[in-house]
Amino acid sequence: MATWRRDGRLTGGQRLLCAGLAGALSLSVTAPLELATVLAQVNGARGPWAAGLRAWRAEGPRALWKGNALACLRLFPCSAVQLAAYRKFVVLFTDDLGHISQWSSIMAGSLAGMVSTIVTYPTDLIKTRLIVQNMLEPSYRGALPFSAGSLLVYMNLEKIWNGPRDRFSLLQNFANVCLAAAVTQTLSFPFDTVKRKMQAQSPYLPHCGGVDVHFSGAVDCFRQIVKAQGVLGLWNGLTANLLKIGPYFGVMFGTFEFCKRICLYQNGYIVSPLSYKLTPGVDQSLKPQELRELKKFFKTGQLKSKKPTL
């Protein structure tokens, strides 16, 4: 998911809900391109449009969104596990003065991404199988970790804008995330290709899952792809994958901001969910619980907590 500055005016549940809904909608919008990418990785289909058209003709328009429901459901546990793991690793890498270096932060993000991937990996395997099933025909012919690379690129983009990340505009953040995703997905794409082929291949499925090369393990998979298709075969499907970056993060940022405004309006910080116009007289530095207690104090004359919140 994209990285936003943490807004203390939202509760943890509201942040997770906003990010989850934004991710689910962006996944749904770009699902056809994801399907074309997976088919190209698994069976060597050339061109995103040909792969998508072939899926449409074989199973109808609904085939373009095959596996998307599971991918959306996977977002919430994946995000929750990754956030919890990241906080634990940050505490582990923080020194006695409460400081954490950039490389330690990257390591914490990478380890958190690995933990969430391991926990939710079965759902990713099922999604791949759902995409390739019923697309099999007898005529088929035969990690630089993404999270580490993404964080490394994103955290150094402040040098491009010549300013601190916490002062980036929404447009700058959008451009940063798209650029970081494009660079790191291009670098890590061969590992993703091998992963997809290993997920799809099974002796219990017709034609071994429709994989265009046969292998006995990860290293052998790399070797067989290069032998059959050349080195560029490791990047088969990259075009469709890069094409989805813009709309994916565009929809994600737009949906997240809209959901955020609804939550801020519900919490009492802004006057309308259609704009960021602040509510007059409301201290924007207060947390939601503190603001609720303050409103209750003015109504009842007493605070719920023993300690003053202001």
Image (cartoon, rainbow, N blue to C red):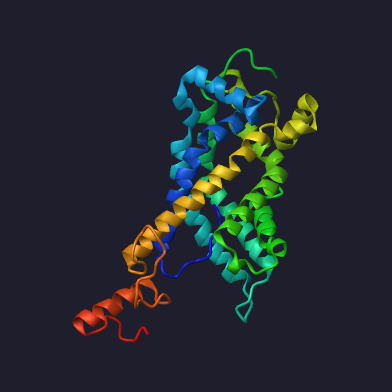
Horizontal arrangement in the rendering, residue 239 relative to residue 291 (left or right) = right
Determine the residue located farthest toward the top in the rendered image.
138
Horizontal arrangement in the rendering, residue 171 relative to residue 305 (left or right) = right
Determine the residue located farthest toward the left in the rendered image.
300
Residue 148 x/y as whole percent? 67, 55
Q: Is residue 273 visible?
A: yes
Residue 55 x/y as whole percent? 53, 22
Residue 147 x/y as whole percent? 63, 53
Q: Residue at x 70, y 30 (%)?
A: 216
Horizontal arrangement in the rendering, residue 304 relative to residue 5 (left or right) = left
- The quadrant where residue 270 appears: bottom left
Residue 103 x/y as whole percent? 70, 65
- The quadrant where residue 303 appears: bottom left
Q: Residue at x 52, y 29 (%)?
A: 131
Q: How many marks?
A: 0
> Of residues 242 and 43, which is closer to you in this image?
242
Q: Is residue 105 above or below residue 290?
A: above
Which quadrant holds the C terminus? bottom left
Q: Residue at x 53, y 48 (%)?
A: 250
Q: Is residue 219 above or below residue 143?
A: above
Q: Is residue 19 visible?
A: no
Q: Is residue 233 above or below residue 177?
A: above
> Of residues 202 and 242, which is closer to you in this image?
242
- The quadrant where residue 244 appears: top right
